[in-house]
Each structure stands twice: as structure tokens, then as C-alpha cells.
Image (tube, helix red, strand yellow):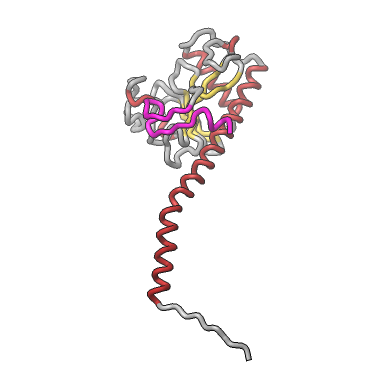
Amino acid sequence: MQNKIFLSFTIAEVLITLGLIGIVAAMTLPTVIKKYQEVQFKSAYKKAYAELSQVFQEALFNQEFTRTKSYDAASTLEELAVFKAGFKIMLDCGNKDIYRCWAKGDTVCGGSCSSGDQSDGIDLENGSPSENTSYCFLDVSGRSWCVYEKGQNIFLVDTNGFSGPNLFGKDRWIFTFGDANNKQANQAQKYKKVITFYNQDILKQSSFCKHPPCYYYSWLLN
């Protein structure tokens, strides 16, 4: 007759084991969640860049851009119209109701770049996007797009719209048009591609990265 081995645990031993499991989970779970969020943010950033680039290249091929100088409101509206035509629009907020397209959260520059009108409650830090100087729309995937400033070819995107964290370098990003040397171009004849406004990551707090690190550059490469 085979001997039977019986294992028994006291309540204290079970509680100690569960406690250890809880401690390990508490230590590792935040890291796992952060990594998962980073993967989601990076994927959304790359997708927005790819789709914006496709719209840009089609417009470039069709010679739809006419900008001749760096600051020109008419050219900016023309470029905005090109983008709006390239996306399926859910809501066009123009420059009067941008609070309907752009959630409260990070603003560009925090007051060091633009004066802005704070009447809509979006421009909490006196930076862009702001009423009258920005134009915004929502596409059908829920992304928010805005012109940074009405006279320039700088475009902002919040890849998950009104969902958080609404921070630049996390779910908010900055694009512009580049020349053959990947430098910002201010004349249509030099337009070659959509580029990120920064050609490097920002690892310290700045006007365009209030919650570092901001992987403006490297997240598009890998």
C-alpha cells in the first residue's frame, strides 16, 4: 500500500504567501502598465504620422501647396483645407469653438510663444492652441488636429482626442513640413515630407515638453 503524503498549510502561511505575491505585484505592475501605455502611445503616434504623410504626399503630387513665406495666414488655411480633405472629419471646430475639438491639458509654450484668448477654458497656460489663433478638427477615429498658429505650417495632433493624459510627448505631438535635409520648410517649392517639429528627443522640461521625456524623434524610427 502506497504511502500518502498530505500537505497542509496554516492560515498564517497562506496569508504570508498572498502578502508576498501582493508586494511583488505592487512593485512590478506600475512598470508593466507604463510599458503598455508607451507601446500604445508610440503606435498611435506612428499611425498619425503615416496618415498625415500620405495626405501630404498626395497634395504635393497634385501641387496643392502655394506657400511662399514663413508667416502667411492664407497659406496656412490652404494647407489646413488640404488636410481636412484628406481625413474623414467628424467635427470641424474652426477657430471659434476649439474647446469642442481639443481637450484641456498641455498647451504649447505655456505663455512664452503666444498671447491667445482664454475665454474657452482651453488656453489655461496662455499657449497654443488658443481661440482665434488656432484652427481645430476631429477626425472619425477620434483624433484631434489643430493648427499651432494661423500663420505657420505647424500642426498639432492629440492621438486619442479627449482621453488622457493630454500631454505633449505622450499623446500629443507636433508636425511640420520638411525640405530635403529634414529641416522645416517655409516655401512650398521646398516641401518634401512631413517631419516632426523636433529632430531629436527632449529629455528635460521645456516649453514643448513639460513632462519629459518626450520622444518626438526616436518613436518614429523604432
Image quarter where the N terminus lies is bottom right
Residue 24 sits above or below residue 181 on the image: below
Residue 150 spot, x, y in % from top left: 45, 18
Residue 32 sits above or below residue 133 on the image: below
Q: Is residue 207 magenta?
A: yes
Where residue 85 sits, quadrant-wise, is top right
Question: 212 or 18: nearer the eye?
Answer: 18
Residue at 59%, 87% (x, y): give it: 3
Q: Is residue 143 magenta?
A: no
Magenta part of the chain? 201-222
Where residue 107 sits, quadrant-wise, is top left
Question: 30 or 24: nearer the eye?
Answer: 24
Please identify the residue farthest to the top as the structure is shown.
Answer: 68
Image quarter where the C terminus lies is top right
Please identify the residue farthest to the bottom as the structure is shown.
Answer: 1
The overriding secondary structure of the stretch rendered in magenta is loop
Residue 94 spot, x, y in % from top left: 46, 26
Residue at 45%, 53% (x, y): give it: 29
In the rendered picture of this protein, how many numbered marks are placed on residues? Answer: 0
Question: 201 or 67: nearer the eye?
Answer: 201
Residue 41 spot, x, y in % from top left: 51, 39
Left or right of 150? Residue 85 is: right
Residue at 38%, 74% (x, y): give it: 12
Where residue 124 sits, quadrant-wise, is top left
Question: 185 or 200: nearer the eye?
Answer: 200
Residue 200 spot, x, y in % from top left: 49, 25
Residue 74 sits above or below residue 58 on the image: above
Please identify the residue farthest to the right as the structure is shown.
Answer: 61
